[in-house]
Amino acid sequence: MVKRSSGFEVKNHSYDPTLYPAGKSIFSILMEGNWITGKIMERDSDDYRSLKQKILEDVIGALSERFPQIRSQIEVTDVPPPSRCALYRELERIV
């Protein structure tokens, strides 16, 4: 079961137009999760794919409450495994 926390961090990457084509934008969303569950499920399994889809739907649902048109504007999504998120955080700390 995916529990919705009190919130999540949304980062708009509009400050760097080299990241996306004209007329588009990129948002990254960081939310707390259960690292242990993620590590256990970080295999190529139906349960893991199902959990990722549930997380994605929960996040889009929450964003839709504030921005009702957002669902139709989303073209690409990615729900990375916990290990990739940890790597990104470590790189942010170094850079």
Image (cartoon, rainbow, N blue to C red):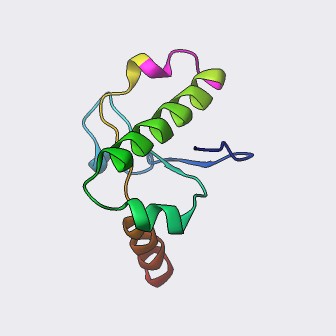
Badge count: 0
Q: Which residues fall within the magenta stretch?
A: 66-71
Task: Work out which quarter of the rendered image holds the C terminus and state it.
Answer: bottom left
Question: Relative to residue 27, is residue 43 drawn left or right?
Answer: left
Which residue corresponds to the image point at 45% horizontal and 84% vertical from the top-left?
Answer: 94
Q: Residue at x 49, y 22 (%)?
A: 70
Q: At which x and y percent is residue 55?
A: 49, 41
Q: Is residue 14 above or below residue 22?
A: below
Q: Is residue 57 visible?
A: yes
Which residue is nearer to you in this view: 75 or 60?
Answer: 60
Residue at image position (48%, 31%) is: 57
Question: Is residue 70 found inside the magenta-colored segment of the image?
Answer: yes
Q: Please state the horizontal and vertical placement of residue 69, each as a whole percent of the image.
A: 51, 15
Q: Position of residue 82 (x, y in %)?
A: 44, 64
With 3 as the anchor, is 90 left or right in this view?
Answer: left
Position of 21 relative to 6 (above/below) = above
Residue 76 falls within the magenta-colored stretch: no
Judge whether residue 82 can be spotted in this image.
Answer: no
Camera-side residue: 54 or 66?
A: 54
Position of the N terminus, as image quadrant, is: top right
Q: Position of residue 45 (x, y in %)?
A: 28, 51
In the image, 77 versus 26, the foreground residue is 77
User: Of all residues shown, which one is farthest toward the right?
Assistant: 6
